[in-house]
Amino acid sequence: MDRETFYRDARGDLPGPLHGVRVLDLTKVWSGPYASSILADLGADVIRVEMPGNREGQALPELPGTGLPWWRQIVHRGKRSIGLDLRKQGAAEVFLRLVASADVLLENYKPGTLAAWGVGYEQCRAVRPDLVFVSVSGFGQYGPHSRRPGYDPAVQAAAGWMSLNGEPDGGPLKAPTFLADDLAGLHAVIGALAALRHRDATGEGQHVDVSMLDAMLATSDGNLTLAATGARLERTGNAAGFVVPAGAYGCADGHVYIAIGLDKEWRAFAEELGRPELGRAAGFATNAERVANREAVDALVGDWCAGRTAEQVEAALTRRGLTAQRVRSFAEVAKDPHVAEREMLQETRLSNGTAAPLTGPAVKFSRTPSRVRAGAPEPGAHTAEILDGLGLDGAARARLRDLGAI
């Protein structure tokens, strides 16, 4: 299938499948903002509520060529922004008026913070009973550790994930991305959409509790269950404990990740090695034999790869229908024509008039295509527009400014 065929029935009059859904984004750092950015890409009207003149992320390096911090551009794309300090008198009243018009509220403050500001779940559902109120935190809204702070690497450590990451003879290693934040953000989106479906069917809103710890455990491939039942879990690095060969093998100019999962694939691989007899030889013929003979198999594959470039290895095995992927840098991936065809980089106009290729949505919709609709706004860029929508007159705004609320 080509791209044109996939999108042949696409509508051009909607911003995405969540057209008509309003989301209040009361979040910080990454997990919550990441979730709301996905909802914005999907077509929701996302209103970011942030401190007036918010400087979060300003100290981080800029997105090259833009003069703007990369953090904000990546994770706050496609949103509107109102500057509102919920710690100030009068701000909670304005916020609750926004809540009355919202379908989803997404927040990731420490449990109890919003209630202390007068805008917790109970206060919000008093003005919007069918509100979907999504809370993301390190350890959840309840439980012995619920009040702990939950920065991403600490949650990776708490979840047991870090203990298994890295080479067998090395120490624990965090992920190079905000993995706990990202997984919590994705689960927050899933939770919001499921709760919206329930609301549409029953008229009932609810509080959705997403813990970064729970998100890590839920996507740890059964390791929590295995550990609870006494299984011994060991660090395997790039290898797979139950498939051989599988790993990143050194080539003349880099590495290729090879995974041979089926015995028929091993026979095809043996043909490519020029050693067809190994396809059915004792110690090699079945995966169970290869797992028991891991060292010899890995040496054989490693020697073959070492005399070839990574591109040669990848091409040769791909021709035989085998899984082989050269280990690439993100810079190389950014130039891949496939990535371009999938629109995973979308040239986007930013708030200061510059442009940058922002990472596009992962999920494709044939009928209601989603995309990065706008760059990240400057903090408070839409305050006047949003207050207009609430019907606040000049006198009310002047009072809020005097109080430092807007």
Image (cartoon, helix red, strand yellow):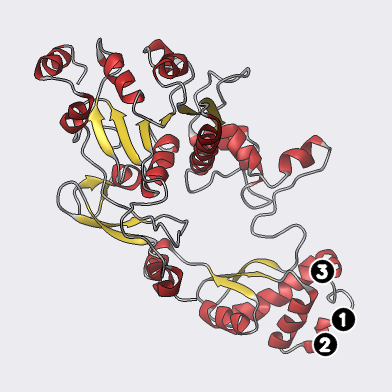
**Residue type for callout 3:** Asn
Whether the residues at callouts 1 and 2 have beta carbons within 8 Å, the answer is yes
Q: Locate residue 401, reporting x and y percent.
A: 14, 17
Mark 3 vs mark 2: which is more N-terminal? 2
Task: Assess disc 1: are there few (<14), some (14-19) or many (≥20) residues with their C-alpha within 10 Å of its C-alpha.
Answer: few
Give the answer, above or below, for where 38 lies relative to 267: above
**Residue placed at 56% from the left, 82% from the top?**
315
Q: What element carries label 3?
A: helix
Quarter assignment of residue 391: top left
Q: Depth check: 126 or 313 in front?
A: 126
Relative to 84, is 75 on the left or the right? Answer: right
Q: Circle 1 sits on which residue?
A: 281
Mark 3 vs mark 1: which is more N-terminal? 1
Disc number for residue 287? 3
**Residue type for callout 1:** Ala
Q: Distance between the residues labelled 3 and 2?
A: 16 Å
Q: Locate residue 77, reporting x and y percent.
A: 31, 46
Relative to 230, is 93 on the left or the right? Answer: left
Q: Circle 2 sits on which residue?
A: 277
Give the answer, above or below, for where 149 lies relative to 190: above
**Residue placed at 20% from the left, 38% from the top?**
378
Would residue 54 be visible to someone looking at this image?
no
Q: Locate residue 318, reporting x and y percent.
A: 60, 80
Quarter assignment of residue 297: bottom right
Q: Depth check: 371 or 69 in front?
A: 371
